[in-house]
Structures are given as C-alpha cells and as structure tokens.
Image (spheres, grey):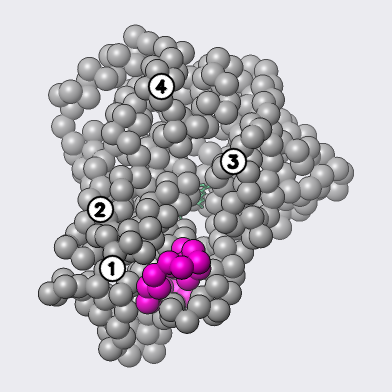
Amino acid sequence: MWEAEVAIVGAGAAGLSLTHRLARPAPGARRVTTVLLDAPPGPLRPPERTWCFWEKGSGHYDAALTASWRRLRVHSPDGRPMDRSISPLAYKMIRSADFERLVAREVAESPDVRRLEAVVESVDPVAEGAVIRARDERGRPVTVRARWVFDSRPLGSLPAARTTLLQHFHGWFVRTERPVFDPGAVEFMDFRVPQPPRGLAFGYVLPTGRREALVEYTRFSGSVLSLPAYEEALRHYTADLLRLGDFEVVSTETGVIPMTDARFARRSAPSVFRIGAAGGATRPATGYAFSAVQRQTTAIARALHARRTPEPPPAHSARSRAMDAVLLRALDSGRVDGAEFFTRLFSRVPTVRLLRFLDGRTRLGEDLGLGLRTPVLPMLHSAAELLWLPRTPFPHP
Ligand SMILES: Cc1cc2nc3c(=O)[nH]c(=O)nc-3n(C[C@H](O)[C@H](O)[C@H](O)COP(=O)(O)OP(=O)(O)OC[C@H]3O[C@@H](n4cnc5c(N)ncnc54)[C@H](O)[C@@H]3O)c2cc1C
C-alpha cells in the first residue's frame, strides 16, 4: 500500500497542473507528499492534444510552449477580417506531450511526488481520507491511501442540463509548399466556412511558422460528424478559403467538448474532490478549460500548503455560468445566428475585454455592457425560457 497526503487521479491537463504546483512548492512552503496515478497507455489515455489559453506576461509553462501570439483574427461570414492586438495578453499553445515532459522532469527532481501507472477502479472514503484501488498494466493490484484525493477521470455521463451542445472538431497539422501563413496572428474564428442550419461552424488556424500550422474545422451542434465529413470541410477550407496550395498533413487532432449548463459536483466524499473537466472546469460558452484548471489547481495547492481544506473553488462564477446558459439556449434554439453573434461581439467589444470576460475577470458593469452588444430580445427570450426548462440527461458523446 502506498501512502501520501495527496493522491491525484489522471495525468491530463488538471492532474499535471496540480502535480506541477505540488512538485515545485514556493520557497518555504510546506511540503506535500503526492502520488499521481494515470492509466497506462491504452484506451483510457487520451491521444496527444493541443491546449491553448491566454495570459498576461510570462507564465509557468513558457518553457514548454510551442508558440504564442499577440494578434487574433476573426473573419465575418461575408469575409470581413478583424485583426486585433491582444497585448498585454498572449495567446499560448502547449502540446500535451511537451506539458507531460515538463512535469515529468519536475516529478523526477521532487522528493515528494511519485508517479504510478495504473487503472483506477475505485476511490472509497475511509476515516480521515480515502483509499484508491487500481491495477497496473500487468493486472496486479495497486492500493493508495491518501488524506485528500483529486480525481480527474472523465465522468461516465454528463449531469442533467437544460442545454448541452457539443463543440466538435477535426484538425490537420499541415506543412505547405509555399510560405502562406502569418505566424504573428491566430485565425481565431473564421466564419467564412458554410454555416449549418443550427449552431455554428468556423475555421481555426494556429500558425507555428510560415509553412506550418494546425488548421481545424469546428462546429457547435447537437451531434458529431463522420470523419469524411470533417475531411471534406477541411479540404474546402484549406483549398478554397485559405488557398494553401500544395501541402502535406503531418498529423491530425480530433476532439469533442461538451458545452453544457449542467451543474458539476466538486466534492464526491469528505476527502475526495473532482478536478478538471469532470469538476466543471470547461467554460460552457467556449469549451476552453485550461485557464480555469490553472485557477483551480493554484487554489488547491495554496490551501494544501496552508493546511486548509483543499476544496476546489468553482471554476466559473455564478454570473459567468448564468450568461453562458443564456447563450447556449439562444444558440440551441436557433434564436440567434451563432456566426453573426460572435462576429458582432468581436466587432463591438475590445478583444482584450472579451478575453478577460471569458476568464471571468470582468466587472458587473463590463458584463452588462457586453450583454447590450448582443441581440438583446432573443437573449432575454432565452433567459426567460431557462426559468421553466427542466434539466434532462444527455447521452455521453
Ligand atoms: C482535442 C482537445 C483539444 C482541446 N483544446 C483545448 C484548448 O485549446 N484550450 C482549452 O482551454 N481547452 C481545450 N480542451 C478542453 C480541455 O482543456 C481538455 O479536455 C483537458 O484535457 C481537460 O483536462 P482534464 O485533466 O480534466 O482531463 P484529461 O486531460 O482528459 O485527463 C484525464 C486523465 O484521466 C486519466 N484516466 C482516465 N481514466 C482513468 C482511470 N480509470 N485510471 C487512471 N487514470 C485515468 C487519463 O489517462 C487522462 O490522463 C480540449 C479538449 C480536447 C479533447
């Protein structure tokens, strides 16, 4: 049996971020013994991913970034480009494999943190803690007892919600023959792609050089597409809209992120907390979770170092969640045209303020001002509908 003060289940964005904070405590901070458990390579391990987020100035993970940008571009459905500086913020891209390597180095140097590869089967509360039962890749039992457990395993099914949309995407890492990309700007939302009858679709381009980029096709809707349908959309986007010319696809990335106004429990037993997407870190209106994960794991580490109960704070404020619930309803009901909605926001609200809003860092007055720049009547209608709409289960994607 392994014993530690903290056990972290899952080494994805949330598990690695918390491990990073415990493996490298601030000078003078109390040390916290930690076991990080992750499933061995296989079906439970998600494929390599790219996480993007924005922050001001330098950050904890700068050494592992693939790229960062100071400009975001949005194209309206009729092709109007809006190119905006986001200074003093930077939009940053980190690949999951690089993040894993960064944290693995820190774990190797830390006397307090151990990493185990095992499939966790149960987490049971016991007096003053919890016991984790798992199996390593050869099927041998592994048991860990910890005072606090932070569990980031994906939920088997989503909690009931009034609205659940899926953000689903497929992307190509491309290398082009000609230098066609502007490495200074991210194509954040390119609405020139054909719009579906409900929800919305956009292109997304993360250029890492003049000839290299991740090019994605993304949709917000109720169900995913087939692989040939994503590929067809990407062919159209890269050939007819971006006019990339000849290129090779070096690798691909696919994802499905639920965008939901469900309520996620953050505590499943007195000593067991859910973190990451499983604990509600995904921002309902955008699908971004990485920044919220950083806020949550920073707060948890602070509480642990101060010997306080390390309950993760809500990932998003009640006001942010309420505003997102209205938007999800307006999009799902078809009352607002998604592409027009986001184009209008980007053309009328300073981009830095919009990004601060998405991180929950705006004041009430700023949020009200932002609300007034949306189509007010359909949004009010959607808000009223939320009052009587029941929360219903959604089949897991
Ligand atoms: C393709 C993709 C791209 C995304 N891009 C962005 C982005 O750019 N920006 C952003 O903010 N958000 C992004 N997101 C959303 C969100 O940030 C990610 O989903 C993020 O990975 C969530 O982190 P997590 O730690 O909660 O879950 P995960 O990263 O999925 O980690 C869960 C971990 O649990 C482990 N696990 C599962 N079952 C078991 C078990 N039984 N025993 C032990 N371990 C187990 C897995 O191995 C995994 O390591 C993206 C999501 C996807 C799918």
Q: Nearer the viewer, mark 2 or mark 3?
A: 3
Q: Earlier in the sequence, mark 2 or mark 3?
A: 3
* Residue sitting farthest toward the front: 28
Q: Is residue 37 magenta?
A: yes
**Dot 1 beta carbon under 8 Å from ligand 1:** no
Query: Neighbour class for label 1 at 10 Å: few (<14), some, many (≥20)?
Result: many
Q: Is residue 362 magenta?
A: no
Q: Quadrant of residue 161?
A: top left
Residue 388 at what x, y percent from top left?
15, 24
Q: Which residue is mark 1?
A: 149
Q: Secondary structure at mark 2?
A: loop
Residue in the foreground of this view, choosing between 186 and 65:
65
The kind of residue tagged 1 is Val
Q: Identify the magenta region.
A: 20-45
Query: Neighbour class for label 3 at 10 Å: few (<14), some, many (≥20)?
Result: few
Q: Which residue is mark 4?
A: 367
Q: Earlier in the sequence, mark 4 or mark 2?
A: 2
Q: Are marks 1 and 4 in contact (CB under 8 Å)?
A: no
Q: Which residue is mark 3?
A: 56
Q: Alpha carbon of mark 1 to alpha carbon of mark 4: how far? A: 36 Å
Q: Earlier in the sequence, mark 3 or mark 4?
A: 3
Residue in the foreground of this view, choosing between 227 and 376:
376
Q: Alpha carbon of mark 1 to alpha carbon of mark 3: how far? A: 31 Å
Residue 351 at what x, y percent from top left?
58, 26
* Residue sitting farthest toward the right: 178
Q: Alpha carbon of mark 2 to alpha carbon of mark 3: how far? A: 28 Å
Q: Which residue is mark 2?
A: 266
Residue in the foreground of this view, choosing between 249 and 209:
209
Q: Residue at x 28, y 33 (%)?
A: 318
Q: Is residue 26 visible?
A: yes
Q: Residue at x 75, y 38 (%)?
A: 184
Q: Is residue 8 above or below residue 60?
A: below
